[in-house]
Image (cartoon, grey):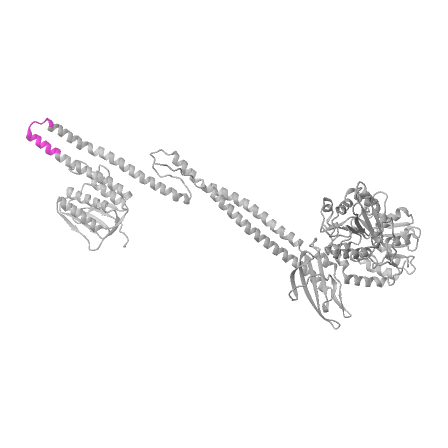
Amino acid sequence: MVEYPRWPTVSLKTRVALAMAAVLLVGGVVVLVTALAYGRQAARDSFDRLLLGAAGNIAASITVRDGAVLVDIPMATFDLLALAPDDRIRYRVIGPNNSTLTGSDAASLPRESGETVLYDGTMGAEPARFVALTRRFAERSFSGSVRVIVGQTLRARRDLTRDIAQNALAVLGGAGAVMALFAWLAVRSALMPLPRIGAALARRDPTDLTPLDLSVPREVALMLSPLNDFMARLDRQVASNRDLIGDAAHQLRTPVAAIRAQAQLAADETDPEKRAHIVARIHARTLSLSRLLDQMLSQAMIIHRTDTVPRALIDLRDIVLDVFEDGEADGAGTVELHLPDRPVMVRGDALSLSEAGKNMLNNALRHGIAPVWLGVRPGGELFVEDAGQGPPPAVLARIGERFGTAGGAPGGSGLGLAIAKAVAQSHGGALRFGRGTRGFEAALSLPLAAAP
Amino acid sequence: MRGSALFLALSVSAHGVTAQEAELSRSFGAGAAAPMILRSTTDLAVMAPVIEAFLTGRPDARIAYEQWGSNDLYAVSQRDCAGSPGADLVISSAMHQMVGLVNEGCARPYRSALTTALEPSRRWRDELWGVTQEPAVMVYNRDLLAPGQVPRSRFDLLDMLRPEDSPLRGRVATYDIEESGLGYLLAFEDSLQATTFGGLMESFGRSGAVATCCSAEIIDAVVQGKFLVAYNVLGSYALARAVVEPRLGVVAPQDYTLVLTRAAMLPTGRDSALAEAFLDFLLSDPGRRALERALLIVPLDNGEGGLFDQPIALPSIQRPIALSPALLLVLDRQKRMLFSALWRDSFPLSPVP
């Protein structure tokens, strides 16, 4: 068989690191773009306000004297504009009939009209931002509007934009570094249980199949509890195999020794009549041994099936009919059948259940007093009742234990009811004994399946 | 270009000649290459030693120096800016005109370790640099004014002008702001500094003060006793003259002293490495020493010797005029018109000196 090497896939830490890096990168780009846009907006807003302030200042300095418009710009206007210290300034005051009263003729005019217009323009080769304000006069000597235009190049705006974006990036970078550090620490601590489980498994004795008792986070428990379940299943199977072997050795030793002794006797016997008698006894012993073997195998099978066979939806009445027919075939005694009219549905393994039923019936036929009643109760109960008093309490208490009743009872290994009990438990039900209306009763009760 | 065609040692063009011609021009250096054209309002005689100091060790360099009046220099620089450039370096004491030229995009940027080391008030946009340090002072005639009579501040001057029989009546002079860009700048800055200026103008008007042109002429007139006091004279010229002329006294006003810096720019359209080197030289230690010897950098701490009658070391007295776009207001047409109207009220006639 060719073995393919299995490369470990990308480590969890690397995955988280890659995801973090991707988040930081994408986030960084988004923040950078946002910061630039925000910075540009903030710079534009604040310096637009400066322009508006300066233009308002100039507009307020306009007076009308003897019909002439005079502009006496205060120094404060230029001190205000000089807050953008490295930017060129262009201003223009336009009187009626579009004459430039003062300032530069070269100042760009707004394309749209309005009382207050902010617009982009140029100063020579440099891009610039302008504001146009209109002030209206209604004097006796002068009536009309005067326009004030103030513009500035964009150096201060660009510097501010850059500063804002740089600061945002610095903060982002710092935050990213801190986030990466925390992510790394978080991943490290989150992954800590995995090496711990590995170490715990590696430390274990090869035969130790007990559950791993480690406190782990819920997510890791999702992996750990199936692992524990798996080990428990393995443990049960190993135990049942061990039990089977132990039981077999224990149970078979006595009958096999007896047969061997009798065979020895038969070999030594010369009287043909006595010899035939011994041979008949050997035959009876062999039959009993064979039944014992059957039961042991069936117990092993049933314990195996409990862990492996999927549960099907079953009508308990069918199981009882099967058991009844089997009992009839044996013809060991009369059995009275009691079945309800409606189906009694349970979830389970039909083979295991009918095996349990057969064992219960067998037990009643063999150890009880006729007549024997076999039936199903609608509550999900399979019962076998006989007219006798049942076994003494000491015996009852030991039912289900291995080598339970084995006691010299002919043909009884004590395994029958143990099997029934195991089946009941593996189906989530119980096997109970007690006094019925007519005598001793054994009942296998199972949870009812939800109606289909 | 009659003026610049003359390579003679000195060529004088009299007042009243058509505008926009160099007053004087002179070629420095013996290099064969095309000369670096330097236009400045600085008197040639004052600037010559500085240029010669620069040319020491530069045998290949040639500098054509042109001395201009500030208004003419402004006009020709504007014309050059619109058309073809005519100078490699322009240095003017009319700081507002230089700020105006830079604001119009007539200068090219230049950065060096020396230009960036300048304090912010002495550079703008890496296109305009303040290379000198010159206080605006009052000068007086020592022979005609007793030491006790010498005005130490504008308040003193005001008090002296007030009496009807003031000895200063008709014998105080200052720049004519219409003739001199520098005069206008100084008067404008005065008007921003204190309310004293209004009173001073009024007193000038009442006492028949004379507004006239040009530092050299005003100082000459004071030395000759035509005027007793001249107000707002550029300290560099006054001190240079006082060194050789014992009759001339120089006072830095004690209420405040305006400190001006000559502004240098590299006009667009020219690319002269020599102009940049000269600019860096002016800002370097050897250049500063040369400028100090020429009294274009006036030490304000009045250390040894004492150039002034009164020290002006107190920073609270000094009012440096910063190279900033705020100076654009000085160029404003309407502002100038209003200011001139005010001025004309005080100086109704502009007598020819």
At 51% from the left and 48% from the top, the residue drawn is A23
**Residue shown at 55%/47% (left/top)?**
A175
Q: Nearer the viewer, residue A172 or B70?
A: B70
Q: Quadrant of the C terminus of chain A?
A: bottom left
Q: What x and y, as percent, mark residue A357?
A: 20, 45
Specify whether residue A439 is in view. Answer: no
Q: Is residue A307 left or right of residue B231?
A: left
In-front residue for pair A400/B208 = B208
Q: Which residues are magenta?
A: A267-282
Mark count: 0
Query: Residue at (55%, 52%) from the top-left corner?
Result: A30
Q: Residue at x 6, y 31 (%)?
A: A273
Q: Position of residue A100 (x, y in %)?
A: 73, 65
Residue B207: image quadrant is bottom right
Q: Residue furthest front?
A: B32
Nearest the eye: B99 or B51: B51
Left or right: residue A417 versus residue B195 is left
Q: Is most of the magenta stretch helix, strand or loop?
A: helix
The magenta stretch spans residue A301: no
- Is residue B59 visible in the rendered image? The answer is yes
What percent of the width, then of the height, locates residue B192?
Answer: 78, 57
